[in-house]
């Protein structure tokens, strides 16, 4: 147990000690080697890197150097990442074998290990994180502490204003004042639908009950999205602190965080945060001597996308199949075990402490008219800088994909981006300049979603993409209501037909009719949004669908049954390399003459395409 | 407190309803019949099938009318083009995943999906595709499950898990692969199913039905070597008429007997006679237990679903269970002994068919203990529904048949026996007899109103010969569980407990005519059928089992005395603890 | 309270299940938590564990079976010695993970969710293991292989196949 005074003292002392983390001119002789321990870098052996550093430092008896694990820095594509503070040197693609050289050259000799410096997309070698284009247009609020602090150390969190917002709320604010700040800040739910957070809190507060609950939705199911996981891995206390504030505000004494069991690191770090907070008396009875009690428990998901839907999540916490409930009543009135329940997602909570401390005006000055603050995106797919980005609302898609993401690799061109995962829609190049906010995305047929942002280049087939998403929905549908259970299956069957070359124009109408009725008829958000990828691809890439059903042609070669590989007579020089490499002898023609492909034999493997030195083969 | 009325507008019609009414019910008041499929009032209110969707002004998306309460000033549209299109697509999707063999389906003519298809004037399926495939389970002697016909309404699951608190079946898998199944896809025969058949009553289509055994009956009827005897349970006669379009609760005893005779049964007897024996034996056993300070409370044993339930779930309470066989088993045993002897028929040539409102009796009749000299007491059990089918197969114009009476020498029964078919009836009949035996008088008090009515648990204290006897009658296995927990924990001080597995008793048994969700929400089927039984009782000249002249005769000539040695051999049984699941580790 | 925490289905039979029942209160809410531990311990959810949980939590076995078959993390059969999981999340899909999955099925001659006859390999489809920066990825018993290609998969399978 720590008193408030003791915690404030930790903050003061620790902040001084950690100044070098955020201040390149910090007055210190210490050096901190920060090793990213997000899931991405951990997968590429960053724990081994940390271990090696520590071993070498011990062996060489080097003083004043500490090796720290941190959360995600964001630029996962360059991982594993090591940063040395206070000088902020940024080493990318580090391997465990590089540790020796970094210690010797950087720490002992004071020189930079040039070969490990990162090359930006424009070819420029950068020394520090901030010089990267990747970071220039970002603004970190929810990710503020990610990559700065050791997420497993509560003192480091406290050093950077941790639990100060909670103190402020418990000591000087009424629940209504908290709600008022949230309302004025304009914060909206980051889970996807964008419901105003203050309103949600005030509804839940408004219902009288002997017991209420606060729930954190960390069941990030959108495949290819890892925002929430990164926050939990990099800064778990910020989420925990906001949950306690929520408990105080709505009048709940118990909280649950529902995390995917597939996120073992996040689970471990959050549990550790809970344990530490309990130890300090920040969770438990009579927090900060305010008379307010609150505790939090971790509940694990077990692999069901639908449990990201709030009522399905509640069912799952209750130990049942994660089948959504019909709304109304909403959880604010009748939630966990029938009690009023506040559910917000991880990123929403991660914003709240900053709003409390810096004020509603500060927060609402960021973003657009209707969408305030920032949004974290997991940028992936065919883009150079795969990683985690946080940008002010209103940033355009073009800025994210090209300025931050560094554009499309392999000299290909941008075809579309998908936001909102399987519930969202694809955005074609003509909408690249759309500002990212809730309303604009909805207007062009997509949605904010939780923050997955997958970029696709021109080698991607849109009917196949639609089929991919429907495949996901079909296997993740809970099976409760008719439209989602059978309707999505029928849509998937039609898309399969189209990709197999058996589709008709009538099938496109059927798809549209099914889509509309599944949207309208389904019980929950999963079903209601399941047709979105089909609707948006049909809207923006209808010609490609028509090509599939009328011309029986897939321009990308992704649909094997529909791709026809041909040799361009103008370009063929008759070298015969294609013929030599064809595994099924489908290429015919005499030596030094123009070759042609026997379509009956061709299996569309694409080998000839890669072998032709003159780019004469295509579809 | 006065109920508050609210006013709402449905399709432009101003409608006044009580507060708490659903939009679906309110629409009915406005003369609109909103289609439903998964909805089963008070049992399955989940909003899964999406047939009942409507638009409510000011609300985003469609509203599920079966579970959404009407509100003051609400403006509801039940027939917009969007609503109509979506409902039709929902129906289309369900049909696309349903076999198209209506003509040969057990539920043809009484299928809620078929009726909806008619209602929508739907003549073809737009969104065809692959159908869910899964094998039939017909290993249970009582219930057949055909998962391919299942439309995932989950009414059966609610009946099993919520109403009966059994949970033998549940939804398994996810998405398109979802289905209703047992643990490990075992047969119903190998899990905690009690064979009560409430799932069949809940099923809107042909995915659940009784194991049909009428073919064997036909075979025996055509076999000149076999002496075929039929007996009919009390609850059959007040429901059979429904299968021929007669109003619910019509007593068709006379027509039923005529029909059975026309079908060719050699003797048409009344299970009610067996019920009178049950009362004699049970009342005697009860008095014996009271006098000898035996295990109390004594619990009735005439509901085979209940018997299997207690064997699986409360084996430690089995000593409480009366050792009496159920009425039709007693009766079967007497047919193959007393009757055979008296008529000079080789008992091995006798084939006893029981017509029952119950499908658990199909299981009961083949229990090892239900035999005497290597012969089963009863050879076949068919349900009320199956009897109706046989009558139709025989081209009989049921509603036009003359009345006739049961055959003798075993065709007479009392009013006490008739009310066996409804919850509280066994208790009431037993009390009538017990009080006379204890006082040695013919008491005038006959009706025990405290144990009548719709309540799932009915408790009463009755004074018999100066002694207070605490009794309770419970129907439905969820209620049975409550009473068992009371007994187990030692909190109960009952003397006599009546349990019926089916909520409402045998009149609502799993073998009775199936009523659609709509009928069940608009008509109180239970009380109509039960009242018909009480009417039979009231009109009977003899209303106490021990006064049944046939019974007296048989005790005098053959069994000697109630609870005597022969009575024990023929009319009593024993029970064994039974595992809930037959599992093998793969 | 001590008495109610006894697990009637497994006492004296399986120390793990007995410990598990001691750890959790006998309330239905704990079902998924307990199943997660069972899955972790055995690598699948054996029938005896289902029965023990049914007895302990007073939940019908059909309902437990319904929960197990709802969540993809729970499996009813033991996985292979090497569980190869291919990420089919969007980021990996866009980078061609389907080709890796197809190759895996072709090599092992089994479908996703199945185990080879010799019990050596099993295939799993996963949705995002969080290593999107390394897409496409597959994992073997949790160890991540990033920037995967068909050749890399072949190489890994060859190595594992020879190991014994």
Image (spheres, coloured by chain):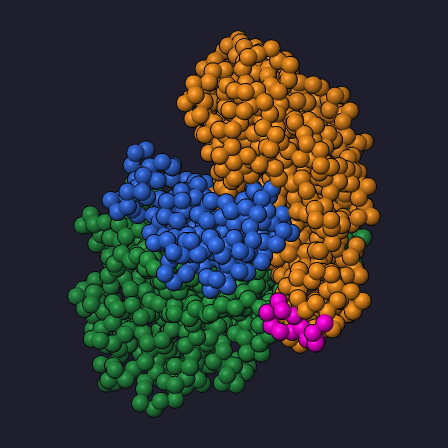
Picture residue at 28% right of the left edge, 46% below the top? C14
Magenta residues, start to end: A579-592
| Chain letter for the part of the structure drawn in blue | C
Q: Residue at x 31, y 42 (%)?
A: C16
Q: Position of residue B244 (x, y in %)?
A: 55, 75
- Image colour for chain A is orange
Specify the quadrant that holds the C terminus of chain A: bottom right
Up-down: is A598 above or below B193?
A: below
| Residue at x-position 49% and y-position 68% | B134
Q: Nearer the viewer, residue A439 or B346?
A: A439
> Does residue B435 belong to the magenta stretch?
no
The green chain is B
Q: In the displayed structure, does residue A404 sit left or right of residue B336?
A: right
Eyeballing the image, is A324 above or below B529? above
Q: Can see residue B435?
A: no
Of residue A288 and residue A409, the one placed in the foreground of this image is A409
């Amino acid at each position: 147990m720590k008193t408030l005074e003791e915690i404030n003292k930790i903050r003061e002392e620790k902040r001084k000690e950690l100044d070098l983390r955020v201040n390149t001119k910090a007055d210190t002789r210490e050096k901190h080697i920060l090793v990213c321990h997000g899931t991405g870098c951990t997968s590429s052996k960053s724990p081994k890197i940390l271990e090696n550093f520590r071993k070498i430092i011990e062996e060489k008896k080097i003083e004043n150097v500490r090796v720290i694990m941190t959360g995600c820095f964001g630029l996962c594509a360059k991982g594993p990442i090591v940063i040395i503070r206070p000088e902020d040197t940024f080493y990318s693609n580090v391997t465990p074998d590089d540790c020796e050289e970094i210690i010797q050259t950087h720490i002992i000799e004071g020189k930079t290990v040039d070969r490990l410096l990162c090359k930006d997309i424009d070819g420029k070698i950068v020394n520090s994180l901030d010089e990267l284009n990747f970071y220039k247009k970002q603004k970190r609020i929810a990710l503020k502490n990610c990559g700065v602090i050791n997420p497993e150390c509560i003192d480091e969190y406290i050093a950077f204003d941790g639990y100060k917002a909670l103190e402020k709320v418990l000591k000087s604010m009424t629940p209504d004042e908290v709600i008022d700040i949230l309302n004025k800040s304009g914060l909206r739910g980051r889970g996807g639908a964008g419901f105003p957070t203050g309103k949600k809190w005030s509804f839940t507060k408004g219902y009288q009950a002997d017991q209420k609950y606060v729930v954190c939705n960390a069941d990030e199911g959108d495949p290819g999205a890892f925002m929430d996981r990164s926050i939990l891995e990099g800064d778990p206390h910020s989420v925990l602190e906001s949950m306690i504030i929520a408990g105080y505000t709505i009048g709940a004494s118990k909280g649950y965080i529902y995390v995917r069991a597939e996120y073992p690191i996040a689970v471990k770090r959050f549990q550790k945060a809970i344990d530490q907070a309990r130890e300090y008396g920040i969770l438990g009875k009579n927090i900060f001597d305010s008379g307010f009690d609150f505790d939090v428990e971790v509940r694990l998901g077990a692999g069901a996308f639908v449990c990201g839907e709030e009522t399905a999540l509640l069912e799952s916490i209750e130990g049942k199949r994660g089948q959504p409930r019909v709304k109304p009543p909403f959880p604010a009135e009748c939630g966990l075990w029938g009690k009023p329940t506040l559910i917000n997602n991880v990123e929403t909570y991660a914003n709240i402490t900053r709003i409390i401390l810096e004020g509603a005006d500060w927060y609402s000055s960021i973003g657009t008219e209707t969408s305030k603050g920032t949004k974290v995106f997991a940028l992936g797919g065919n883009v150079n800088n795969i990683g985690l980005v946080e940008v002010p609302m209103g940033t355009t898609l073009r800025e994210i994909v090209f300025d931050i993401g560094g554009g499309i690799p392999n000299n290909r061109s941008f075809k579309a981006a998908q936001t909102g995962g399987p519930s969202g829609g694809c955005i074609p190049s003509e909408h690249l300049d759309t500002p990212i906010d809730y309303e604009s995305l909805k207007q062009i047929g997509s949605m904010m979603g939780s923050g997955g942002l997958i970029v696709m280049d021109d080698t991607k087939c849109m009917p196949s993409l639609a089929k991919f998403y429907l495949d996901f929905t079909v296997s993740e549908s809970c099976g409760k209501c008719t439209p989602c259970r059978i309707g999505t299956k029928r849509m998937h069957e039609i898309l399969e037909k189209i990709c197999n070359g058996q589709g008709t124009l009538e099938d496109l109408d059927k798809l549209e009719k099914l889509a509309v009725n599944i949207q309208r008829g389904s019980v929950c958000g999963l079903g209601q949004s399941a047709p979105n990828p089909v609707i948006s691809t049909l809207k923006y890439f209808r010609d490609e669908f028509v090509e599939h059903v009328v011309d029986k042609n897939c321009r990308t070669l992704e649909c094997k049954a529909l791709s026809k590989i041909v040799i361009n007579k103008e370009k063929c020089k008759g070298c015969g390399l294609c013929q030599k490499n064809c595994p099924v002898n489908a290429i015919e023609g005499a030596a030094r003459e123009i070759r042609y492909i026997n379509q009956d034999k061709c299996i569309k493997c694409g080998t000839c395409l890669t072998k032709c030195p003159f780019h004469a083969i295509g579809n | 407190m006065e109920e508050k009325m609210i006013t709402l507008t449905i399709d432009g019609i101003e409608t006044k309803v009580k507060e708490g009414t659903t939009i679906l019910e309110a629409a009915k008041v406005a003369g609109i019949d909103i289609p439903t499929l998964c909805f089963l009032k008070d049992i399955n209110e989940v909003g899964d099938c999406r047939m009942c969707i409507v638009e409510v002004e000011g609300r985003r998306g469609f509203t599920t009318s079966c579970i959404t309460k009407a509100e003051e000033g609400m403006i509801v549209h039940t027939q917009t083009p969007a609503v109509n299109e979506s409902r039709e697509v929902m129906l289309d999707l369900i049909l696309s995943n349903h076999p198209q063999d209506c003509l040969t389906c057990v539920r043809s003519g009484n299928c809620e999906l078929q009726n909806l298809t008619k209602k929508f004037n739907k003549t073809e399926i737009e969104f065809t595709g692959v159908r869910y495939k899964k094998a039939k389970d017909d290993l249970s002697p009582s219930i057949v499950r055909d998962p391919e016909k299942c439309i995932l309404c989950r009414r059966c699951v609610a009946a099993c898990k919520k109403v009966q608190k059994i949970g033998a079946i549940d939804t398994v898998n996810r998405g398109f692969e979802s289905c209703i199944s047992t643990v490990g896809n075992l047969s119903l025969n190998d899990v905690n199913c009690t064979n009560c058949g409430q799932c069949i009553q809940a099923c809107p289509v042909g995915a659940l039905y009784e194991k049909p055994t009428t073919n064997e009956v036909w075979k025996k009827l055509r076999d000149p070597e076999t002496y075929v005897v039929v007996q009919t349970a009390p609850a059959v006669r007040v429901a059979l008429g429904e299968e021929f379009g007669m109003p619910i609760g019509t007593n068709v005893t006379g027509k039923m007997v005529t029909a059975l005779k026309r079908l060719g049964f050699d003797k048409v007897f009344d299970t009610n006679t067996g019920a009178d024996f049950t009362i004699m034996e049970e009342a005697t056993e009860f008095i014996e237990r009271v006098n000898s300070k035996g295990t109390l409370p004594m619990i009735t044993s005439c509901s085979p679903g209940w018997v299997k339930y207690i064997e699986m779930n409360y084996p430690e309470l089995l000593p409480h269970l009366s050792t009496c066989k159920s009425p039709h088993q007693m009766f079967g045993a007497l047919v193959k002994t007393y009757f055979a002897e008296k008529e000079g028929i080789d008992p091995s040539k006798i084939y006893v068919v029981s017509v029952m409102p119950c499908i658990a009796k199909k299981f009961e009749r083949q229990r090892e203990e239900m035999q005497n000299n290597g012969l089963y007491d009863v050879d076949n059990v068919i349900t009320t529904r199956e009897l109706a089918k046989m009558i139709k197969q025989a081209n009989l114009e049921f509603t036009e048949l003359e009345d006739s009476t049961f055959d003798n020498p075993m065709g007479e029964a009392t009013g006490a026996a008739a009310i066996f078919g409804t919850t509280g009836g066994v208790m009431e009949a037993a009390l009538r007899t017990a009080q006379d035996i204890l006082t040695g008088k013919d008491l005038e008090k006959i009706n025990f109103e405290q144990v009548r009515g719709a309540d799932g648990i009915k408790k009463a204290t009755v004074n018999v010969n100066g002694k207070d006897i605490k009794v309770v009658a419970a129907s439905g296995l969820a209620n049975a569980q409550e009473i068992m927990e009371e007994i187990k924990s030692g909190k109960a001080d009952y003397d006599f407990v009546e349990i019926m597995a089916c909520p409402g008793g045998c009149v609502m048994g799993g073998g009775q005519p199936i009523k659609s969700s709509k009928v069940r929400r608009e008509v109180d089927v239970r009380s109509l059928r039960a009242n018909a039984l009480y009417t039979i009782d009231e009109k009977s000249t003899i209303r106490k089992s021990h006064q049944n002249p046939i019974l007296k005769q048989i005790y005098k000539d053959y069994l000697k005395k109630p609870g005597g040695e022969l009575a024990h051999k023929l009319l009593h049984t024993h029970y064994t603890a039974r595992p809930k699941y037959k599992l093998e580790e793969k | 309270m001590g008495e109610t925490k006894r697990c009637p289905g497994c006492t004296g039979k399986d120390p793990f299940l007995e410990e598990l029942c001691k750890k959790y209160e006998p309330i239905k809410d704990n079902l998924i938590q307990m199943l997660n531990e069972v899955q972790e311990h055995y690598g699948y959810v054996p029938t005896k564990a289902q029965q023990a949980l049914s007895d302990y939590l007073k939940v019908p076995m059909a309902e437990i079976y319904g929960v197990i078959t709802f969540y993809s993390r729970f499996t009813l059969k033991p996985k292979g010695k090497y569980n190869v999981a291919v990420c089919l999340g969007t980021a990996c899909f866009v980078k061609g993970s389907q080709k890796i999955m197809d190759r895996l099925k072709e090599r092992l001659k089994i479908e996703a969710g199945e185990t080879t006859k010799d019990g050596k390999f099993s295939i799993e489809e996963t949705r995002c293991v969080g290593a999107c920066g390394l897409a496409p990825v597959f994992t073997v018993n949790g160890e991540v292989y990033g920037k995967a290609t068909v050749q890399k998969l072949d190489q890994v399978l060859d190595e594992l196949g020879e190991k014994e």
